[in-house]
Amino acid sequence: MVVETTRDNICVNHIIGQKTENFIAEGDSIIPDIKPDIINEVCTSGTVCIYKKEINEGKVRLDGCVNAYIMYQADDENNSIRGLNVNLDFTQIIDMPNAMPDMNLETDVKLKNVECKVINGRKINVKAFLEANVKITSNENIDIINNVNLKGIQMLNKNLNVNSLIGRGTTKAYAKDTLVIDNIDNLSEVMKADLHISNKDVKISYNKVLAKADLNVRILYLTDDNRINSVESVIPVMGFIDIENVSEENLVDTKYEIKNLIIKPNNVEEHSIYVEVELEIYCEVYRNQEINLIQDLYSPRTNVTFTQKQIQVMQRRENVQRTCNIREKQLVPEIGSNKIYDVSTGVEITKQSILNDRILYEGELKLGYIFNSGSGVGTKNTSIPFSFNVDFSGVNQNSNIDTNVEIGMQDFVITDDGSIDVKVDIVFNVVLLNSAEINIIDDINEEENRSINTCSLVIYYVKAGDTLWKIAKKFGSTVEEIARINGIENVDKLNVAQQLFIPRYNG
């Protein structure tokens, strides 16, 4: 006979697989007829755009491009500096065992470096070195029995906090702006463009998540009279994602990905550059939920059978954001007191140590200076080592940590003594993912009744590994009765060879 039960329902998010794969996007490019020949490359940069991503059986496919900018020394009488914009399209297939089309895909594709090789004065080969971080997850709605409606049933319960997935979704957002340059500057060409997202925030109301952030844009450009200048802007980004039953108490995780990018001189308004960026905003919402989990059960009076299975659940998902403030003076003799046109920034984490309740990050802040060398444009790469602690309650050696590093505020000023006053904020976004394997009891059935006679006492000596629950179940007694008869105050503490009197049902 099937036993009547009451149940809770939770939506479990399983991690099916995670993988990091490096690959190269490569192509040859011809110098346009309107530009002079190339002698050598001065510096390169780029932005990754992901057009499309999909899961096939056992594989992930990524389609996108690297929008690369190449500053080069021109083969003309002035050895001037010119710029070239190249798009490197790519399709990358990543093997992901157990991946299926109906699963969820998260990607983070980073540009590590761009290399330019001169083939001849009119042709170059460009390589972009990329790193793709891919995660496949799957959702499963699970019924968990929290109570059994059977007289005399003995249940071993455990309260467990889990993160139950409420929902996920995506939306497109557009960041558009016209960047006004100096009135005396007649724009010749864009030489470099840096874009990064900062100040992520979310607001929740009426079954919607409002995702907000800033797109920081800095553009290096060339004027008609061969001067190099720069302009920057902060463009607000906003998007709504519909998710039912979301509330302010929920945990919201958002990710931003650039899908397309347009940077060009504004044909309508002089002395300005038009910027349009298409982004995809991905959002997941979780609820912290306490469940009363039955680990084991039996009845002293009847034969009870059940099935049991193990599942992996996300027991704890928490986010913290901390900022590492780099404040340092750098002496770069090559720059001296000359003008700095631009500084590219990047972070390399060389070591991550997980300690109790904190994470220690060691790494380097990579700086790429572009400056006026007096006879043209010079470049210089430097680095600043750092060590930074992120306090995170509950983190330990077994924790699954996902770290995303962003550059916040940055400022570089040449001081009177010729050194560079470096101010850079490195923003650490850290996600703690603790999972647990739990036992789920299901299909509880009551079989024929035992014949119940008067109780008798059994003398039992505790063995290694014994618990009162195991002993009570073995002899068809109860934890409460054994504790009462033997005067045990702490039911979780037994001593090996301890003598116990156990009331046992005969039959």
Image (cartoon, rainbow, N blue to C red):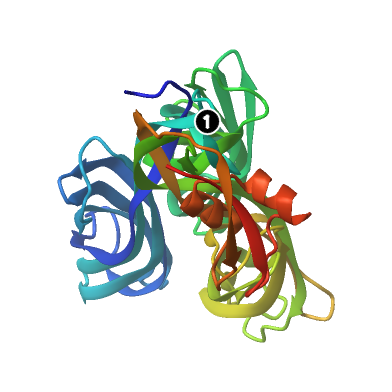
Q: Quadrant of the C terminus?
A: top left
User: Which residue is at a point 69% across and 69% down the rendered structure image?
Assistant: 356
Residue 364 position, x and y percent, is 60, 76
Q: Residues within 10 Å of mark 1 (few under 14, many from 20)?
A: some
Is residue 94 positioned above or below 163 on the image? below
Q: Quadrant of residue 276?
A: top left
Residue that protrudes farthest toward the bottom in the picture: 333
Q: In which quarter of the image is the N terminus?
A: top left
| Residue toward you, 74 or 392 | 392
| Residue toward you, 472 or 337 | 472
User: Which residue is at a point 52% across and 56% down the rendered structure image?
Assistant: 470
Left or right? Give the position of 167 relative to 156: left
Residue that protrudes farthest toward the right in the picture: 416
User: Which residue is at a point 55% across and 31% down the rendered structure image?
Assistant: 152
Residue 331 position, x and y percent, is 72, 83
| Residue toward you, 357 or 256 | 357
Residue carrying label 1 = 146
Is residue 328 positioned above or below 357 on the image? below
Residue that protrudes farthest toward the left in the picture: 57
Q: Quadrant of residue 191?
A: bottom left
Q: What element carries label 1?
A: strand
Left or right? Give the position of 301 relative to 326: left
| Residue toward you, 449 or 216 | 449
Whether residue 433 is visible here, answered yes or no, is no
Left or right? Give the position of 476 relative to 48: right
Whether residue 90 is visible here, answered yes or no, is yes
Residue 419 position, x and y percent, is 76, 79
Q: What residue type is labelled 1?
A: Asn
Is residue 190 positioned above or below 268 on the image? below
Residue 283 position, x and y percent, is 48, 34
Left or right? Give the position of 460 relative to 493: left
